[in-house]
């Protein structure tokens, strides 16, 4: 048995060395000027882009009235300029398909009582049903906290995160693919397109992941323990693509006990009757410029009316 | 302990289905003892029939009932113009049903033929049917091989455990690095046959041939390796089948435990080749058609099995033709003819795989039609690659996976021998390097999305 364990350790060590060697070779050997490693898996992505810029724009020492968390609905649907017009300094820390697990570790590592008074979590039904590994790869490559990156990978308990962390290490040897900050304002970047399709699409049925609900609970708990006010909102989606009311009711039923336990208000605008016109949407999932203006104004007025934000 | 682990493993999927499994286990256990205790041939046949009806009955209800009703409905609609309001079963197929049913039946047959003593220990017999490494996708074992091993107390043996783990590692490599990566491209083409071009479907068909080999032989290696770790030696299920020089040889190297099951319990009882020539060929065709149905309740599997039956018949006729003319390969060119035979055999198997993988018969014929009216131009080829990956930026990844497949195809015959200890590497360092590279490749290139083993559904 001792021989077995000793040889097993030597074997594992040898495998690790070979792994790093192959990874290194594939990282430095290029085809069409792209490192080969990016051709091996969908989860291997460049460092750079929107998420990279957002986390470098975010100033941990600044004082924000509001920080936004959530998926692309958050970073493409809540405009800091409109919040500024209402008198609030807001930063948008939403990222691509940000799951509650990722939101939790962002909150844990970036949001403190000293730099934030209120957090708005934009919940979107779809992020409750997937681990969105490719999006997690994006955050692991681009977040500027090694601790947060490692914590996210460990929390996922997925072997693919080994490659993500290795790539994060090797990406330090590579330049940033796209660090253009133009268009990204306090983590916000809208779509400038206009939705034209009017065919109703069938929404597949889905089940929420227990992990997503658990991390939603942890997220709210972590923020409230920090003494930060938490508000949950859901922004509208075009009726032609809307999640069925039955499906949405199932999700609300699951998060309602958490909201009640922590006394967190929920501004559910998914089926907002004042936002059915297609001009308010950029595409199947996101608001257009006019939609953002209208929705942000509505939400902020509601929050002020209910006393969740100072007038 | 092993029985408890096996029960837990089975109940992890649909717990209540353990009752079905226990039902057949109890029936076969009792039938085995009665078969051994009886000398009367008629009574023996009665007990055998009793056991077979119980096993095939379960299989028929869970696997073929809805298929049967579907076909009656199709016939009814085409003859009378209306459907019959049957009550369909809305239930999941118990996992590995066809495998453990066949394993249980092999025990009853062996006791019936007097080649195996009835097992008196109920726990040991139950473990023979439920042994979890091979419960869901084989190999379909024989009682002579497994039952005696289950009676022995096994202790930790370094070499055995190491060999078992390394075999599991190789199986995992085949599954997650080759099969699962290829499955993405295969699904992209085979689930959209309307839009996919002939070239796309041809590439996907080649990929599927290797996907199914790596998926199933990978599972078998994991099962055999896991059993070895626990001290149980299971039979070999695959022997580099794509190197076969004929379809007959292919079936002695592909899913060996199933093909030998059909040989021993169906083909030989039907008379095998000791009947008239016509009946021999008919038996072959029948056995392979039934083998097709065994795989699934769908006409695509029936056609797949029938095609293999047909290949074998044509093979016999070809051998007769060659023998009658006393043709001999040209001296010095035997390697060329061998290679040609391997290529032909592989492509015959590949053609049959189209029916195996297609979602339905109409799709299968559509795929065949498109492949035989292919556009061989370079732009068509480029378009096909883009279709398979859905985005031009990902073509590089497909090419990388293609290179990985080529490396596998070249190294598989050698590695298969090394893993099965048929070829001993004298240098321990070299051996460690080979296996450490396999482990590193699994982490680096493995596809860890949700892809089930193909044969779990059978």
Image: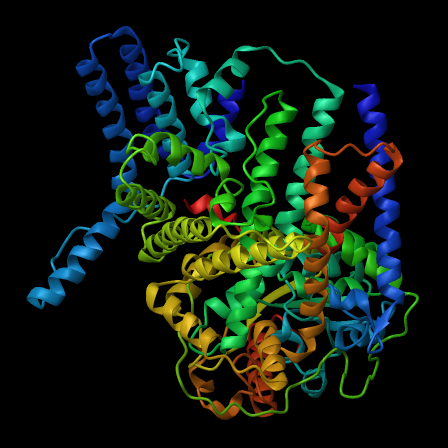
Outermost residue on the left side: it is B80
Q: Nearer the viewer, residue A308 or A225?
A: A225
Residue A215 vs residue A8: left or right? left
Seen in the picture, residue B44 relative to B233 is either above or below; the reply is: above
The image position of residue B190, as x and y in percent, is 47, 67
Visual colour scheme:
rainbow
Residue B174 vs residue A200: left or right? right
Seen in the picture, residue B344 relative to B257 is either above or below; the reply is: below
Name the residue located 59 percent from the left edge and 75 percent from the top edge.
B390
On-image quarter of the C terminus of chain B = top left
Q: Nearer the viewer, residue A35 or B111?
A: B111
Name the residue located 86 percent from the left edge and 39 percent from the top edge.
B430
Outermost residue on the front side: it is B325
Name the residue located 73 percent from the left edge and 63 percent from the top edge.
A40
The image position of residue B13, as x and y in percent, is 45, 39
Whether residue A259 is visible here, answered yes or no, is no
Q: Nearer the viewer, residue A111 or B382?
A: B382
The image position of residue A167, as x and y in percent, is 82, 61
The image position of residue A42, as x and y in percent, is 69, 66
Seen in the picture, residue B334 relative to A205 is either above or below; the reply is: above
């Amino acid at each position: 048995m001792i021989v077995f364990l000793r040889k097993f350790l030597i074997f594992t060590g040898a495998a690790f060395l070979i792994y790093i060697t192959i990874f290194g070779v594939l990282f430095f050997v290029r085809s069409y000027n792209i490192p080969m490693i990016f051709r091996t898996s969908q989860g291997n992505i460049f460092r750079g882009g929107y998420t990279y810029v957002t986390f470098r724009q975010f100033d941990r020492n600044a004082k924000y009235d509001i920080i936004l968390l959530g998926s692309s609905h958050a970073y493409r649907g809540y405009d800091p300029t409109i919040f500024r017009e209402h008198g609030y300094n807001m930063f948008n820390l939403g990222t691509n398909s940000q799951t509650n697990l990722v939101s939790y570790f962002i909150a844990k590592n970036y949001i403190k009582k000293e730099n934030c008074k209120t957090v708005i979590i934009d919940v979107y039904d779809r992020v409750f049903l997937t681990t969105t590994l490719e999006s997690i790869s994006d955050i692991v490559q681009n977040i500027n906290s090694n601790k947060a990156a490692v914590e996210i990978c460990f929390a996922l308990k997925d072997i693919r995160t080994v490659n993500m962390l290795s790539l994060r290490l090797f990406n330090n040897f590579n330049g940033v693919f796209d660090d253009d900050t133009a268009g990204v304002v306090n983590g916000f970047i809208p779509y400038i397109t206009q939705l034209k399709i009017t065919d109703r699409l069938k929404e597949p049925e889905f089940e929420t992941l227990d992990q997503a609900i658990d991390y939603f609970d942890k997220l709210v708990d972590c923020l409230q323990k920090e003494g930060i006010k938490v508000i949950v909102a859901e922004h509208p989606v075009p009726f032609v693509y809307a999640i069925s009311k039955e499906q949405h009711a199932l999700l609300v039923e699951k998060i309602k006990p958490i909201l009640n336990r922590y006394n967190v208000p929920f501004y559910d605008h998914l089926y907002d009757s004042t936002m059915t016109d297609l001009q308010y949407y950029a595409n199947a999932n996101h608001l257009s410029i006019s939609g953002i203006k209208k929705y942000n104004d509505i939400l902020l007025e509601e929050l002020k009316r209910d006393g969740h934000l100072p007038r | 302990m092993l029985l408890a682990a096996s029960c837990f493993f089975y109940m992890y999927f649909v717990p209540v289905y353990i009752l079905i499994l226990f039902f057949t286990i109890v029936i076969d256990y009792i039938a085995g003892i009665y078969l051994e205790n009886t000398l009367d041939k008629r009574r023996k046949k009665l007990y055998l029939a009793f056991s077979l009806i119980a096993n095939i009955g379960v299989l028929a209800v869970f696997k073929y009932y809805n298929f049967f009703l579907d076909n009656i409905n199709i016939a009814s609609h085409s003859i009378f113009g209306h459907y019959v309001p049957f009550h369909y079963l809305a239930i999941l197929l118990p996992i590995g049903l066809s495998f453990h049913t066949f394993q249980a039946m092999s025990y009853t047959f062996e006791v019936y033929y007097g080649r195996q003593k009835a097992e008196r220990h109920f726990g040991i017999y139950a473990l023979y049917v439920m042994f979890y490494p091979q419960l869901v996708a084989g190999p379909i074992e024989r009682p002579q091989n497994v039952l005696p091993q289950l009676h022995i107390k096994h202790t930790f043996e370094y070499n055995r455990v190491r060999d078992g783990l390394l075999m599991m590692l190789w199986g995992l490599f085949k599954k997650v690095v080759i099969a699962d990566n290829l499955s993405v491209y295969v699904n992209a083409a085979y689930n959209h046959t309307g839009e996919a071009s002939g070239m796309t479907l041809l590439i996907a068909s080649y990929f599927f041939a290797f996907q199914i080999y790596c998926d199933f032989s990978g599972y078998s290696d994991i099962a055999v390796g896991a059993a070895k770790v626990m001290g149980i030696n299971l039979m070999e299920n695959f022997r580099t089948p794509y190197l076969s020089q004929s379809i007959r040889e292919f079936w002695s190297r592909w899913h060996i435990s199933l093909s030998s099951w059909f040989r021993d319990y169906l083909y030989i009882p039907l008379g095998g080749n000791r009947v008239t020539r016509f009946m021999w060929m008919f038996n072959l065709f029948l056995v392979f058609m039934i083998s097709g149905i065994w795989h699934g309740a769908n006409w695509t599997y029936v056609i797949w099995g029938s095609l293999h039956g047909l290949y074998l018949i044509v093979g016999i006729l070809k051998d007769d033709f060659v023998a009658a003319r006393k043709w001999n390969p040209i001296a010095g060119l035997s390697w060329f003819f061998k290679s040609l035979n391997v290529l032909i055999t592989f492509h015959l198997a590949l053609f049959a795989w189209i029916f195996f993988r297609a979602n339905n018969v109409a799709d299968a014929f559509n795929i065949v039609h498109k492949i035989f009216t292919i556009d061989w131009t370079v732009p068509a080829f480029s378009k096909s690659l883009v279709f398979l990956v859905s985005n031009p930026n990902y073509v590089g990844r497909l090419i990388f996976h293609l290179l990985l497949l080529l490396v596998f195809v070249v190294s598989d015959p050698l590695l298969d021998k090394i893993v099965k200890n048929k070829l001993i590497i004298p240098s321990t360092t070299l051996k460690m390097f080979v296996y450490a590279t396999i482990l590193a490749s699994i982490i680096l290139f493995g596809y860890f999305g949700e892809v089930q083993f193909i044969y779990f559904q059978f």
